[in-house]
Image (spheres, rainbow, N blue to C red):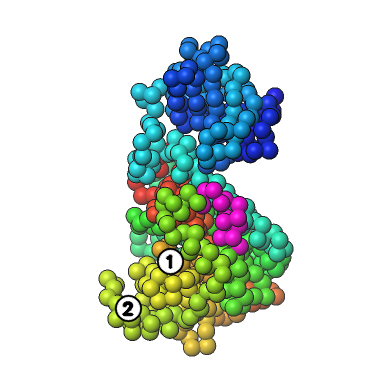
Amino acid sequence: MKRTRVVEALDAKMIGEKIKLCGWVRTRRDSKGGFSFFELNDGSSMKSVQVLAPAELSNYESELLKASIGSSIEVHGEVVESPGKGQATEVKATEIRVLGYADPATFPLQKKGTSFEYLRTIAHLRPRTNTFGAVARVRNEICKSIHNFFQSRGFIYVHSPIITASDCEGAGQMFHVTTLDLLKIPTKNGEGAQEVDYEQDFFGKATSLTVSGQLEAEVYATALSDVYTFGPTFRAENSNTSRHLAEFWMVEPEMAFCDLEGNMDCAEAFLKTIFTDVMNNCAEDMAFFNERIDKTVLETLTGIVNSKFERLSYTEAVDVLKKSGATFEFPVEWGIDLQSEHERYLTEQVYKKPVILYDYPKDIKAFYMRMNEDGKTVRAMDVLVPKVGEIIGGSQREERLEKLEQRMIDCGLPPEEYWWYLDLRRFGTVPHAGFGLGLERTVQFVTGMGNIRDVIPFPRVPKSAEF
Ligand code: ATP
Ligand code: MN
């Protein structure tokens, strides 16, 4: 017999059907009338279905009364109208098999509220809680929405490599990839100092885990016009914040024949589509987040979908912050990299909606961003949202060969090593632009979850790679 999912069994349309259900017991209540109720969940929805187990079942005393929270069971029975409030149906069992017991003395997820910190230490069991089930479903919906958005607009999904020899951000926060024996590292004599001899390494040169798929996306955008990458990226930044992971997922569209305005339009439409899809397709999970995690998430998302993002230049933003009279831990001066407190002040206090900042000082941005006429700023843009701060970073790319080469030299990057990247400017160069959206920051924003470690199944952060 085909298994019915709990989400289907909850539907009144199923009343009268004979079904098979499988799942994990969330609670068992034994009534004085000589029967028991199981709340059964299989992750297909937030809600569990109530299963009525009559005492007449042959294994009622011997097995079912031992099936406590966390046990897995298989139920055969009929969907009936539920006399209880808050549910349309329940399942009257004619047979229940215990698939696996969970000893109540040692099963770590008992009914009482458990802290997110504790749940991180049992990341293998936390998806069985309401919160982490909901996070997983919302994260999945966001991924679906991301693909739908680009696919419906004719973008080609490109797979950029995980192992790379180029440092996209030029920031040096990369994880090395090597097969060299760390106790016997081969060296050679470089400019007055000993250097690692990477010629003896697996790839014959130094390699790392990628921090971004952008450079490779540019290769494909300058052939297929509109492309996107979507995959894991890695940053060895030693920042123990609630918004940084060492391994996170990023979606990076790259568009040929597109300038910064087109890039901002795309980013704004993209975020609005994601938020709309989540509210439409994960209504139950979102109601849960709105009630239990952050009472403002639904209102905030609805507001964003219906409003126009504020757009202002970095220079204007610095003026606004300076004139605000607010005191910040990090004082504001033109040229600083805006801190989370500044970003949040702009989105939460001043504009009360997402803000797109553009034209940043060149010294705080990457080498590939297009230089403005003023020689001081580049065509960068960041999308900031309340609470989370930066959710998207992007730019129009420098498509002029000489300017790009000069910028690389100024940034201390050897142009020879980026010969293939520069070839894109040598042969049929075109204006192009793109951005990166952090998947986990998006899940955080949508759900209201406070810590980024709780919106990815297995977080990787400094000093922790358990599970
Ligand atoms: P931040 O200043 O917040 O560290 P960034 O400027 O380093 O971000 P970008 O290099 O522009 O970020 O990366 C694009 C997007 O990737 C960011 O807007 C953010 O959503 C996400 N992101 C960046 N670093 C991390 C991280 N360590 N963990 C999770 N998401 C990240
Ligand atoms: Mn960063």
Q: Please check the rendered image and state whether residue 279 is part of the magenta-colored stretch, yes or no.
A: yes
276 in magenta: yes
Of residues 422 and 33, which is closer to you in this image? Answer: 33
Q: Quadrant of residue 263?
A: bottom right
Amino acid, disc 2: Val
In this rendering, which labeled residue sits more in front, label 2 or label 1?
Answer: 1
Mark 1 residue crowding within 10 angstroms, few (<14) / some (14–19) / many (20+): many
Give the residue drawn at x 58%, y 77%: 260
How far across and down, in percent of the image, does residue 343 sit?
Answer: 40, 71
Residue lying at 54% horizontally and 25% vertically, measured from the top left: 52
Residue 332, numbered circle: 2
Residue under numbered circle 1: 386
Residue 160 visible to an observer of this rendering: no
- Which of the two labelled residues, at mark 2 and mark 1, occupies the earlier sequence position? 2
Would you call the spot at circle 2 few (<14 residues within 10 Å), some (14-19), or many (20 or more)?
Answer: some
Residue 322 picture location, percent across and down: 33, 82
* Residue in view at x 50 percent, y 51 percent: 287
Q: Is residue 420 above or below residue 175?
A: below
Query: Is 396 rendered above or below residue 179?
Result: below
Nearest to the observer: residue 187 or residue 76 = 76
- In the rendered image, the quadrant that contains the C terminus is top left
The magenta stretch is 273-286
The reply to whether residue 190 is visible in this rendering is yes
